[in-house]
Image (cartoon, rainbow, N blue to C red):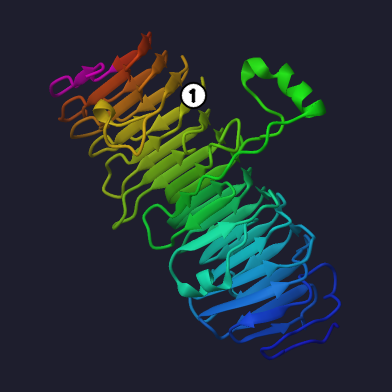
Amino acid sequence: MGNFRNLVIGIVSWTSFLGALPTTPTVVSGTVTFDTSMSNTLIVNSTSNLSIVNWASFTVLGYETVIFNLPSSTSAILNRVTGAVATQINGFIYASPSQTGNGIVYLVNNSGISKGAVATIATSGFLASTLDVSDGDFLGGGNMTFTNSTNQTLNNNGSIITDSGDTILLGYQVVHAGNITSPQGSASLGAGGQIVFNPNNAQRLQIVQVAGPAEPTGISAYFNSLFAEKKEKVIVPTGVAIASGSNINAYQAEVKADGSLYTTAIDHEGLIAITGTISDNGNVIFDPTNGVNYINANIRCQNFDGTGGNVTFLGGSIELDNSALIICSGANGGGEISIGGGLNGVGTPYNSQSTVMQRGALLIADASVASDGGQVVVWSDNTTEFYGSIFSRGGKTFGNGGTVQVCGVASLTNQGNIDVSAVSGTAGQKLGCP
């Protein structure tokens, strides 16, 4: 079907495009046409603000390109794969011919989605999910509930660039080992069986907890017994894994998972760099919904006005490993870092029951030039082990030291280092449990 163009709205089918480009589209909503006149290229033209296309398969090989022409940067198209074949993206997806990003692209495949290391997606906004969403939710413009029982994984090894909107990755499991660049939007990763996405909320994702998997029997039970000391279960892998060498650059990072489904709900070993916008502060939130939150990563968070941003780690159990580095410093004032709970155990949706900060872990909320240091809290309602280092120092030209609180309400091991000094002001506060 090499010379195929200008197909009007309706039910559309063909055997395949050249190569492995997406096949057999069925237009569900909106006015959409398709053009394959260019070699190894599929152009999807929509004149509707919201449109939906179902595909039998959606594969893009390394030499192939899919271009979405949408009416505006806020227009969106939902691409749903109805066949039983996982999506493989090794080529390029753009939301305008000029490759500058024009429109929001949704890609849903219950059979799995995987992006190769050389794959590039450039759009105004991008959402990929192995959980499905109803047509009514998508067209309604409000909350969208993503759910599915096939328990498939979303793997991102390539680059995703959204120039004005969000990058959203959803799945029963999500593995991010590539690069996300969303300077004006949120980078939101969610793992679970049911996730509510609200594009109009500051926090885009809400995890709806579902029943955990049944206890394993037979050979799985045998292997689980071998890992009992580590409390690992073969049947329940990591929910969201952010691999070493991966990068996220956005004004907000949000990582959430259903802690009832995974041995480790969040495992973060990559790099996150957050810079707020004029209208939105820089925020990072990791919430495994009472599950295990393991951090061995480099996170830097700053606001547009030169103050430090906000980082919040929640979880039933939190561990900051030896290489964990969290910096919420700013020339004009330190930011806030909350690990396991807020100041005096108040201000977060729930508190950790076990928080461990290993010896090499480092939290920094300095005012590097002027103003006061920030606020850093390491908390658990039960057991806290603190071996790392925390800095919340006043500015070099003026300013006081910040506030640092380390508390384990039931049990505290405090062998770490805390510095709330001030060169040109008053030293800050070192607080224990209230």
The residue singled out by tag 1 in the image is 319
User: Residue at left 47%, top 26%?
Assistant: 318
Q: Circle 1 sits in a helix, a strand or a loop, which is it? A: strand
Residue 129 x, y percent position in the rendering: 62, 57
- Position of residue 193 relative to residue 97, above or below, is above
Relative to 427, 22 lies left or right:
right
Residue 193 x, y percent position in the rendering: 59, 49
Count every numbered label the image shows and give the total.
1
- Position of residue 149 relative to residue 430, above or below, is below
Q: Residue 217: name its quadrant.
A: top right
Residue kind at label 1, given as amino acid type: Glu
Q: Quadrant of the N terminus?
A: bottom right
User: Residue at left 62%, top 36%?
Assistant: 238
Residue 230 x, y percent position in the rendering: 63, 18
**For the magenta stretch, what is the residue range?**
419-434
Question: In this view of the protein, can residue 271 be seen by the observer?
Answer: yes
